[in-house]
Each structure stands twice: as structure tokens, then as C-alpha cells.
Amino acid sequence: MRAVTVSAPGQISVEEVPDATLPGPGGAVVKVEATAICGSDLHFYDGDLPLYPVAVGHEAIGTVAEVGAQVDGFAVGDRVLVASVAGCGDCAGCATLDPVACLGGAKVFGSGELGGAQSDLLAVPAADFNLLTIPDGVSDEAALLLTDNLGTGWAAATRADVAPGETVLVLGLGAVGQCAVRCAIALGARVLAYDPVEGRRAMAEKTGATALTGTPEDVVPAVLEATGGRGAAAVIDAVGHNATVDTAFAAVRSTGTVSVVGIHDLEPYPLALLMGTFRSITLRMTTAPVHRTWGELLPLVADGRLDTSGIFTHTYPLHEAATAYAAVASRSADCLKAMLIP
Ligand SMILES: NC(=O)c1ccc[n+]([C@@H]2O[C@H](COP(=O)([O-])OP(=O)(O)OC[C@H]3O[C@@H](n4cnc5c(N)ncnc54)[C@H](O)[C@@H]3O)[C@@H](O)[C@H]2O)c1
Ligand SMILES: [Zn+2]
Ligand SMILES: [Zn+2]
């Protein structure tokens, strides 16, 4: 089978590797029908997470090709989506439906421990826990977003304690930020949104946000002006740079919440504890509790209360992965998120 591999910053190849095999009696092998490039894959591509070589990708939908003897809920031929973060499915942590709480340790596809989803076949452990049947009426785009980005946006917004009518600032309008904007609006917030790329701001405006313009330095004064000098009730950081966490702390009102889902590099962040404590700021940092979000998001997605259209802007065959990565990594107005078809 083929597997998209990053071997050095900016170096993508589509390698021939041995076919994925059943990862034990509770596992399944999924024939990947569509997979996607996420900002998290770009950390390997950009060199922020220099762990090479790595078979990448953690967002996949497809058809079950093989099931282990202990799998109850799935059979060969079922159309499924795969949780980007896998748990063992059999511990007290997984019983909370948050794979991050797995006592065996959460594992993310395409980051070394599990195979990459940008491949022809994907071995999925604990299939009964980590797979979900794609319900009728859920598009391929929506199903792919339910593997990761939509759950991340939802977790970013719910863990920002978004209350109806309150002002929430979303920093970063890649696919994750766009999902966070839509989720915060669905939860009743007034959303201010900022990204240095104008076209990405325009997309957020189309879904109901108010875009802040100018440079990153203009964001805090604009938020203060829009909130009568008080600051945002919550700030969602969908970037994860020192600069955006700094902006989040400066733009949030005292007693507000900073909700970080952007992935930082390996260096520590110098947290201004004194001011954070003095101003009673809540800091939440979240890896998407993917499995738990399905129950909350599926009804919203299935009947259109949460719109997932427009986030995928490009589709490429898997063998053109290098071109697709270059397009997504350019963070242009034009290319927000790409699907790869094996
Ligand atoms: N926590 C999770 O479970 C989870 C899940 C998926 C992705 N992520 C992370 O979320 C982040 C975003 O993912 P994405 O797919 O949207 O990636 P992306 O790279 O497409 O989006 C990042 C955006 O941030 C913008 N940006 C850069 N500097 C900025 C600044 N100073 N202020 C505001 N915006 C700025 C960029 O222009 C870009 O549009 C990545 O770090 C990714 O790893 C986390
Ligand atoms: Zn992802
Ligand atoms: Zn577990």
C-alpha cells in the first residue's frame, strides 16, 4: 500500500510500505476512501515537530476491509469514520468518551505510534470504540471534519464556557478556527475573529463572525473597543504560538477564559502567572475529546444547524500529496483544507 511520509521539513513522499494488518482481535483494517491534511500534519512538514520519518495523517473515512474476532459493532463493508485520537476503549478513562483520558495513553494516528491515515489502508485498534458508522445524510466533508477539526472547534468553544450573547474572540482562521467560529455561534456567542490572511477573515464573516482587520498588534485595541473596554468573555486560540497566547491573555476580560487548541512547538511558554491569577483567568488547553463530541455534533450536522460546507477548498489524488501539502502550508486565502483521495 502507499503511505504519505514526511522525511524532513518540506519533504513529502508517497512510499510503498507493507499493507496494514489487523492490530489484534479487537481491531479493524479500514480501506481509506478519503483523508485530509490538518494543521497538525503541518507541524511535521514545517519542522515544528521534527520526528522523522513519519507516516502522516489522522483524518480518514472509508470502508471496513477486515475485522478482528472480538469486534461486535462493525462488519466488512461498513462505511465509517475514524477518530483521529484513539483510546483502548476498555478502561475507566475511555468510559468517559474522552480518548485523552485513556489509561493506556491516547494515541494519535500519523504521529509515530499508529499508522498514518494518508494511505490506502489504516489499521485501527479497538474498532468498537474508535470507529463510527457514517450516518445517512452526513457528507464526506462533514464525516472527515467529525474525525477531528469539528470536534476540536466544538471542544474549544464549549471549554471556553461560551454563554449566549457573550463576546468570544477566535484567533486563527484555518480549518480549526473556522470550525470554532461556527461552533461558538451555534452556542449563541457574538464572535470576533482574526487571522492575518484577509480571505480567511472573509470566510469567517460569511458564517456570522465580525472580522477584526489590520495586523496582530491591532487585535487587542479592537477587542477592547468592541467590548466597551472590558475585553472578551473568552478567547479561543486556534494557532498556538507564543504571540497568540499573549494576545489571548491581553484580550480576555478579567474572570474570562482562554481556551487553547492550537498546538505549540516543543519549547515552554512563559506564562505570566501573577497577572493571570490576579485577574482570575481560567486557562483551558484541549486535545479534542473526539468520541464524546460525536453525540453532540451529529444531530447539529445532520440537520444543518452546524454548516460544514466551504472548509474543504481542494481535492487531490493521494499521489499528489506533495503538491497538496505545499498548497495547504501556504496558508493562503484560496486553500484552507485539502482532501486526498487514495
Ligand atoms: N487540539 C486539538 O485537538 C487539535 C486538533 C486539530 C488541530 N489542532 C491544531 O490547531 C491549529 C490550527 O490548525 P489548522 O488546521 O486550522 O491550521 P492552519 O495552519 O491552517 O491555521 C492556522 C491559522 O493561524 C493563522 N495565524 C498565524 N499567526 C496568527 C496570529 N498572530 N493571529 C491570528 N492568526 C494567526 C494563520 O494565518 C492560519 O490561518 C494547529 O496548531 C493544529 O495543530 C489542534
Ligand atoms: Zn487533525
Ligand atoms: Zn482506554
Image (cartoon, helix red, strand yellow):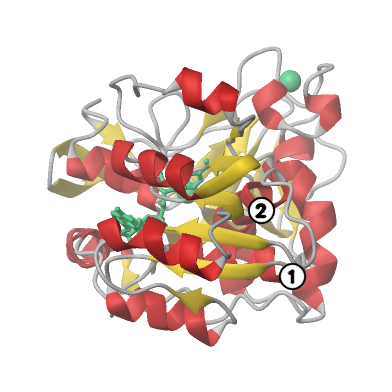
Above/below status of 78 relative to 199: above
Is residue 214 toward the left or the right of residue 26 in the image? left
Give the class, few, some or many, for how many residues have Cα within 10 Å of label 2's Cα (few <14, many ≥20).
many
Query: Residue 184: x and y, percent?
Result: 67, 63
**Is residue 240 among what the camera can see?**
no
Is residue 187 toward the left or the right of residue 107 in the image? right
Give the amino acid at mark 1.
Ala
Give the class, few, some or many, for how many residues have Cα within 10 Å of label 1's Cα (few <14, many ≥20).
some
Query: Residue 147: x and y, percent?
Result: 61, 53
Q: Are marks 2 and 1 in contact (CB under 8 Å)?
A: yes
What's the residue at 73%, 54% (across, down)? 162
Which quadrant, please, contains the C terminus? Answer: bottom left
In depth, the one of 40 and 162 nearer the eye is 162
Mark identifier at residue 186: 1
Query: Residue 322: x and y, percent?
Result: 18, 59
Above/below status of 165 relative to 100: below
Query: Residue 137: x and y, percent?
Result: 77, 79
What's the residue at 49%, 36% (across, down)? 109
Give the amino acid at mark 2.
Ala
Q: In 3D space, how far apart are the residues under numbered discs 2 and 1 (Cα atoms)?
A: 10 Å
What's the residue at 42%, 23% (across, down)? 272
Circle 1 SS class: helix
Is residue 173 toward the left or the right of residue 61 in the image? left
Q: Report if the beta carbon of the residue with label 1 is closer than 8 angstroms to ligand 1.
A: no
Upstream in sequence: badge 2 or badge 1? 2
Circle 2 SS class: helix
Mark identifier at residue 157: 2
